[in-house]
Image (cartoon, rainbow, N blue to C red):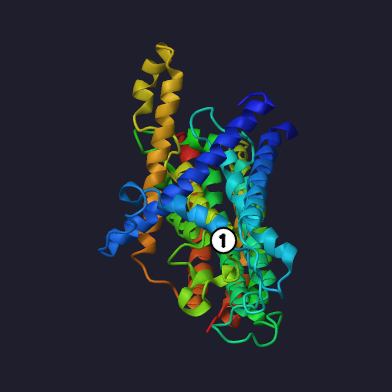
Amino acid sequence: MDLPLWATGLIGFLIINAMLVSASVLVYAERKVSGYIQNRPGPNRVGPFGFLQPFADVVKLIMKEDIAPRAASPFIHSLAPVLMVIIAMTVPAVIPFARGFVIADLDVSVLVVLALTSVSVYGVTLAGWSSNSKYSLLGGLRSSAQMISYELSMGLAVVSVVLIAGSLSLVDIVEDQASGWAILGWNVIRNPVGAMLFIITAFAETNRAPFDLPEAEQELVGGYHTEYSGMKFGMFFLAEYVNFFIASFIIVTLFFGGYLIPFEPLFAHVFYDNGLGWLLGVLQFFALLAKTAFFAFLFIWVRWTLPRFKYNQLMTIGWKYLLPIGIVNALVIALGVAVFEALGL
Amino acid sequence: MLTDFVPLFLMMALALGLALSLLKLHQLLGPKRPNLIKTAAYESGMDPIGTARERYSVKFYLVAMIFIVFDVEVVFLYPWAVSFRDFLAADAGLGVMMVVSFFILVLGIGLLYDIKKGGLEFE
């Protein structure tokens, strides 16, 4: 968007606030969904249907005492949650929310997403190391090993998408999926293995169950955030929920047509002819939101359905299955692109 | 071109502001009554034994090393992936495909060797 800097800043500010609100909605949704999955009502005391519960939790977290172990490294101990929040809140800048509506329209936005998610490994590792507690250290180590292992497969899944689109820009990748009838142009149809690979690695990268070994309560207490209390813990919590919301956005953008509405080319001209282009943009935004909400629900659903992997199983899946599958998939997609180009499709 | 990144850094600055204000708010509003027990590292109710800055399994180091090798591989694949259609348009598709396949084959042998040597066994 070609907007003055203050307008971009204002939109960024609004989006960060929207992310905060959606994080609380997701916390509420997770507790409510898990409640119904386990045949209990979930939070229902604070506000109508317990809807104000996450807001009450935030107030509680801020009012709590900030306890850090005296053996900890104070600066790094505070740096880690700050890092996590910055990463979680910066990624929305490159997500195209509707046609022509993206804060930072970069040529390399895919690389920016991958780079930022890699940096969040530092947040987890530093949190685990700086606390100077054995549980935290083990949690941080496990977490960093898990995240870097799955980052490779994630990168390869993205390579297969880039091969199809021929561009590193998320906007181009979404527009590239507009071809084909209804949803046939979506990358999930053209590249189903890559889509599965990316969804699985997204679960691992966001440390969500069944890959939530970093915070396996039964063995590691709280994992890397054992020694965090009050709002510092709240910041990890916030980052986790924003992260899986953003992971849903990225899954939708890369594989499920982003903001595209099925059959959009059939009726898009009606909007443009009547000068209602902005209304189409709003509809696209809601289409994106609906698809994203489904994947956010999937994240919650999976967490309360599947048991956690053992650590050796986790490593085996990552290195011996997902990585070779990712490499072969990238080559197959390349061949497919070559064949389709040769046939002139 | 570089000005494209300004909004990204702006967003980063806003996020930093949010994180710092949350920390500051937490410091201002929370009580501060530390004592010896409270500031000890958590160890299931026992007094912590020693420090956590100890030696840990060399396996993690191995994983990190292999990660570097394969991450660089994936990074090398990106330029190829972006310009693959251009190579096809220039009728260089077959040659490029063979080069990339050889590159991946070499690394695939490396991965196979690592698996056979048990570098990725976490038992």
- Which percent across, then down, holds residue A172? 54, 35
Count the labels in the image: 1
Q: Which residue: 37% across, 48% down?
A: A51
At mark 1, the secondary structure is loop
Judging depth in this view, the residue of B91 and A324 nearest the camera is A324
Name the residue tied to disc 1: A64
Give the letter of the chain under mark 1: A
Q: Which residue: 60% across, 76% down?
A: A138
Kindly indicate the quadrant of the structure image that contains residue A271.
top left
Q: Please, is residue A321 above or below residue A275 in the view?
A: below
Judging depth in this view, the residue of A190 and A257 nearest the camera is A257
| Amino acid type for the residue under numbered disc 1 | Lys
Judging depth in this view, the residue of A316 and A122 nearest the camera is A122
Outermost residue toward the top in this view: A274
If the image is split into quadrants, where does the N terminus of chain A sit? top right
Q: Is any part of residue A43 visible from this angle?
A: yes
Q: Please, is residue A40 above or below residue A297 in the view?
A: below
- Local crowd at mark 1 within 10 Å, few (<14), some, or many (≥20)? some
Kindly indicate the quadrant of the structure image that contains residue A189.
top left
- Which percent across, then down, holds residue A223? 55, 72
Q: Which residue: 69% across, 86% down?
A: B50
In the shown orientation, is residue A147 left or right of residue A302?
right
Kindly indicate the quadrant of the structure image that contains residue B3.
top right
